[in-house]
Amino acid sequence: MVIATDRYRSGTNLLLLPFEARVSSLSAAAKARNSGLEGEGGFRFRFGVGSLAAHLDEAAAHGLAATVVDRPGTAVDLDTADDWSQLPDEVRAVVGEQVPGLC
């Protein structure tokens, strides 16, 4: 499993799981729609502050090796105005071209 953390090393911005872990996380209705997919006690997804630690604990509980990725390109979340200010100028400029009045 690969986890890309936020810039505070507390949250989860990206999460890559093996297929088997994702399948076991499906709801009963989703399992019925995907009749060939089975599994119980699936991976529990978390959000927000503390989700990195929770995902690492969840990986351990499921016997998954976990790698944490801490890179500028995946560390910035866009939840607050402060997050926006952390984006590189060139990225904000490109987004600003697509969303007039944003910059």
Image (spheres, rainbow, N blue to C red):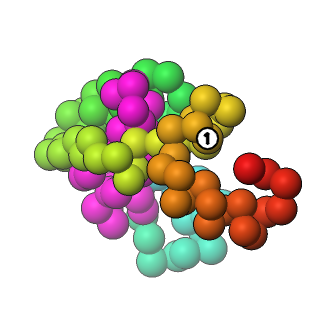
Crowd tier of the residue under label 1, counting other residues whose Cα lies within 10 Å: few below 14, some 14–19, many 20 or above: some
- In the picture, measured across the screen, residue 13 lies left or right of residue 29, that is left
Residue 41, percent from left and from top: 40, 42
Please identify the quarter of the rendering in which residue 24 is found. bottom left
Q: Residue 85: where, in percent of width, then height?
A: 58, 37
**Residue on which the image places disc 1:** 84
Judge from the rendering whether residue 50 lies leftward or rightward of residue 57; answer left or right: right
Q: Depth check: give the residue in front, 30 or 12.
A: 12
Percent from the top left, x then y, of residue 102? 79, 51
Q: Is mark 1 on a helix, strand or loop?
A: helix
Q: Which residue is drawn at 38% across and 53% down?
A: 73
Q: Position of residue 69 (x, y in %)?
A: 25, 46
Q: Nearer the viewer, residue 80 or 67?
A: 80
Left or right: where 14 falls relative to 63: right
Magenta stretch? 1-23
Residue sticking out furthest to the top: 50
Q: Can residue 19 be found in the magenta stretch?
A: yes
Q: In this view, does 41 lie above or below 35?
A: above
Residue at x-position 28% and y-position 33%: 56
The residue positioned 27% from the left and 42% from the top of the image is 70
In this rendering, the answer to whether 58 lies above or below 23 is above
Report the residue at 54% width, 29% height from top: 48
Please say whether residue 50 is visible from this viewpoint: yes
The amino acid on which the numbered mark 1 sits, given as a three-letter code, is Trp
